Image (spheres, grey):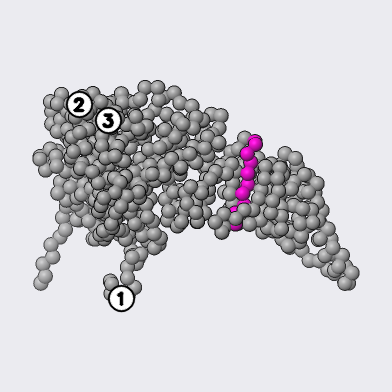
Amino acid sequence: MGFSMQPYGIQSMLKEGHKHLSGLDEAVLKNIDACKQLSTITRTSLGPNGTSFSRSTKVSDKCAFSATFWHLGFEFRAGKFWDLGMNKMVINHLDKLFVTNDATTIVNELEVQHPAAKILVLAGKAQQEEIGDGANLAISFAGEILQNADELIRMGLHPSEIISGYNKSIDKAIEILGELVEPGSENMDVRNKEEVICRMKAAIASKQFGQEDVLCNLISEACIQVCPKNPANFNVDNVRVAKLVGGGLNNSSIVHGMVLKGDTVGTMKRVEKAKVAVFVGGVDTSATETKGTVLIHSAEQLENYAKTEEAKVEELIKAVADSGAKVIVSGAAVGEMALHFCERYKLMVLKISSKFELRRFCRTTGAVAILKLSPPSPDDLGYVDSISVEEIGGTRVTVVRNEEGGNSVCTVVLRGSTDSILDDLERAVDDGVNTYKAMCRDSRTVPGGAATEIELAKRLREFSFKETGLDQYAIAKFAESFEMIPKTLAENAGLNAMEIISSLYADHASGNTKVGIDLVEGVCKDVSTLNIWDLYVTKFFALKYAADAACTVLRVDQIIMSKPAGGPRRDAAPGGMDED
């Protein structure tokens, strides 16, 4: 007779197949370890990214969660010590390749499965949605303060004491950050190109180091062009990006209007100073909504029926031409007969299938989209300076320019040798536009180049000495976490991190609060002379989200996972096949 032991405790309460982890070793430390692994991936991408140095490549394979992932490490030889936020090569579950140092793209495509690491991913996403830049700082800093919390727990501190110290630290850090704001930076003209470039440069350099001057010029011009009377209402969707393979970044340009990939329908390839009619339902003979039967008794009646249809289409097209429109934009199919009459009346026909592009086109031209083909009223018509078909790098594009009137859409035409480079340039433009939106809300700046972080570390350490309880150890470790920024910047640029950090501390101790790292020359300098500034709001939200995410992870003392739902797993191998 077999003896079976009855389940007890939590095992008797949950279904068979559940997982239950509790205690410091099983839950807290394992959660911290998962977050450390994620921040290690993004950390080496922190800081400027560029390629203007001599290097040899050493590739080591790393598997990251559910995606195939390579972490590219580089050995330095003699050459310029320009930047280096390293790129990651990520291949997602659809076999799409990403080569980027953009933390948001990396963590999104990794499909992180660990619940604690997901909290850091959510902090990065929140930062991206709020500011559009600084996601890497949020994830990397959260990982660093969790790593220091690991050491404190092993020393014997309870997680609640660490959380208490971290909460005091972030409040004090935000107070100090407000004191480090550059006087006068809150007063800014968002239409002044030089002031915009000054604040945007750091964000662009972190993606495309060495090319920030070219990109900042393009992005600032595009943003200023579409900035509304009230800058707080700036819409990032009004700055579009057209990626055309071929040429290089120096061939990129700005179009005050839209660039549509594809040719026009018909033979008309260029019009100037034209009125535009937009039809959502297409330019074709419309079918009746109800079914009907037409009885034809003779060939003459058949011929007259065909002529009636033809006459009706001609009448509609003639009415559009008589309204003064020279361009017809269709949101659906363009019929052969309708096209024939458009050609007869010298009307240019454009087809835009995407309803979102059609809305942007209406914003650009000021046209009102009409549901079906009918004579437009003067109020429904839009206006363009010119529409022309051009060939850029072997790709035929339709360029819609509207430079005179209040232009609400501007397009950055990016050129590059490969799709991967163009995707990375697009991410840099996206960061730049989001930074412009952030500076429209709050234009205050703080010193860049790790100057702010070292000053925060110095002052927080001094603050920790004034505390009497066990919180002081957590505050000291929080202060130490700020050293991760200059350390990573120095290591990524091939410099001696310890020398750089000790030099920064020495300069800040003597009262030079604006001394940071000059990555080009590999020395510590006053960043105000180098014009390296970071937006206050980017730092504010990145630190706040990082601290909140870390405290959320530390508060977890049990993980209870139910049995997964049934059905085959997506990554399961077909039956009868080996794992290989």
Per the rendered image, the range of residues in magenta is 396-405
**Residue ID for mark 3:** 515
From what the image shows, is residue 210 above or below residue 354? above
Q: Secondary structure at mark 2?
A: helix
Number of the label disc, if any, that sits on residue 577: 1
Answer with mark 1 or mark 2, whichever residue precedes in sequence.
2
Residue 223 image point, x, y percent: 51, 37
Q: Secondary structure at mark 1?
A: loop
Using the numbered discs, state the Cα–Cα distance from disc 1 to disc 3 in whole angstroms. 60 Å
Residue 404 within the magenta-colored segment of the rendering: yes
Q: Earlier in the sequence, mark 3 or mark 2?
A: 2
- Indicate the quadrant where residue 504 lies: top left
Mark 3 surroundings within 10 Å by alpha-carbon count, few (fewer than 14), some (14 through 19), many (20 or more): many
Camera sees residue 450: no
> What residue would you read off at disc 2?
509
Residue 394: image x %, image y %?
Answer: 56, 59
Quadrant hosting residue 63: bottom left
Q: How many marks?
A: 3
Where residue 205 appears, as percent x and y from the top left, is 38, 42
Crowd around label 2: few <14 · some 14–19 · many ≥20 (10 Å): few
**Residue drawn at point x = 75 percent, y = 49 percent:** 374
The three-letter amino acid code for the residue at tag 1 is: Met
Classify mark 3: helix, strand or loop.
strand
- In the image, 366: left or right of 438? right
